Amino acid sequence: MEEENHALRERLKIIDKERIEYLQNVSHQLVAPLNAIKWHIENLTEGRFINVERIKKVLRSIYSQATIAVHLAKNFNFMSNLEADHALSALKEPLQKIELCRLLINLADDFQPLAWDKEVVIQVIDERFDSAPPVLAMKPLVSQVFSNIIENAVKYSSPGTKILIDGGYQKETDSVFVRVRNRGIVLREEDKQRIFDRGVRSPEARNVYPAGTGFGLYIAKRIVEIHEGNITVFTDSEGWVTFKVILTVTGLSGKARRRD
Ligand SMILES: Nc1ncnc2c1ncn2[C@@H]1O[C@H](COP(=O)(O)OP(=O)(O)O)[C@@H](O)[C@H]1O
Ligand SMILES: [Mg+2]
């Protein structure tokens, strides 16, 4: 009994330590974009820029930094919910019909200013994709899955490359797939499974983007699994890294609340 007690206490200590580290990590990362926004606004209000092009650039940068901050705060919220309760009902979101093509076009628009900083273009290939039926799912959660994947694609792409997003309906399984493809840092064979675990980041990812939690794909996978879907990653010899998400059209109908 004493031994068991001791083991449990040790386990609790580790969990506590992880929690504190995560909190520190998130707050640290939130401060950076918020400070950048403050700094840009200060420059604007002090009238330090007179050139219209320069002002536009600063405004775009404010938008990018705000995107990063919002994204991070949302992930933080999902993390707390996922860790607090594993049951689907605890997520409390009603199911609704989601047009994935539309959702991805909106997300691409949201991340494009961030991508411009690296001259990376995000392209949604909508032929075939826009005729796919809507999927029944929890919209804010599904949206976070794709924003985590797109954010990675933007962060880890080489400058001057393209991010390609497409999708379509798979009749046999009555599901819709979405692919997000990019070229940038290497993804090694042995890392392909691990990157969906909590806190895992490759050295290359740390190198090009030191601030990061390693929680994005973990959250994405958890959400996809809650929806009884599937998330996988592929690489090819030309350096493309492809994330593929499959969601069923009928989703969790009958298993969760619906909003029509
Ligand atoms: N598009 C991508 N290309 C190459 N590697 C990727 C890509 N997306 C994710 N990864 C790898 O997966 C890891 C985990 O991603 P994620 O959970 O989003 O955490 P983070 O982005 O904070 O590192 C990254 O650190 C990186 O090693
Ligand atoms: Mg990430």
Image (spheres, rainbow, N blue to C red):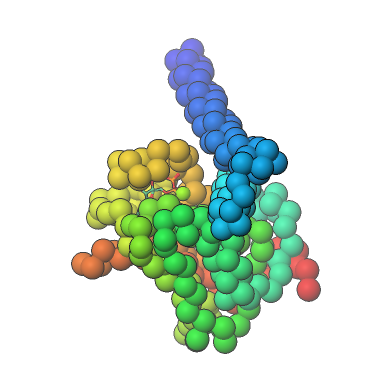
Please count the marks in the image: 0
Residue 200 place in picture, x, y as percent: 39, 42
State the residue lying farthest toward the front: 50
> In screen coordinates, is 133 left or right of 172?
right
The residue shown at (41%, 56%) is 118
Residue 241, visible in the rendered structure: no
Question: Is 72 drawn above or below residue 15 in the view shown?
Answer: below
The residue shown at (47%, 19%) is 10
Residue 92, visible in the rendered structure: yes
**Residue situated in front as seen by the camera: 208 or 93:** 208
Among the 4 quarters of the image, the one containing residue 180: bottom left
> In screen coordinates, is 42 left or right of 195?
right
Residue 229 place in picture, x, y as percent: 51, 66
> In screen coordinates, is 256 left or right of 155?
right
Placement of the C terminus among the 4 image quadrants: bottom right
Residue 14 place in picture, x, y as percent: 47, 24
Question: Is 113 drawn above or below residue 36 in the view shown?
Answer: below
**Residue situated in front as seen by the camera: 124 or 52:** 52
State the residue lying farthest toward the top: 2
Question: Is 228 drawn above or below residue 6 in the view shown?
Answer: below
State the residue lying farthest toward the left: 237
Residue 161 place in picture, x, y as percent: 35, 65
The residue shown at (54%, 28%) is 24
The residue shown at (59%, 61%) is 110
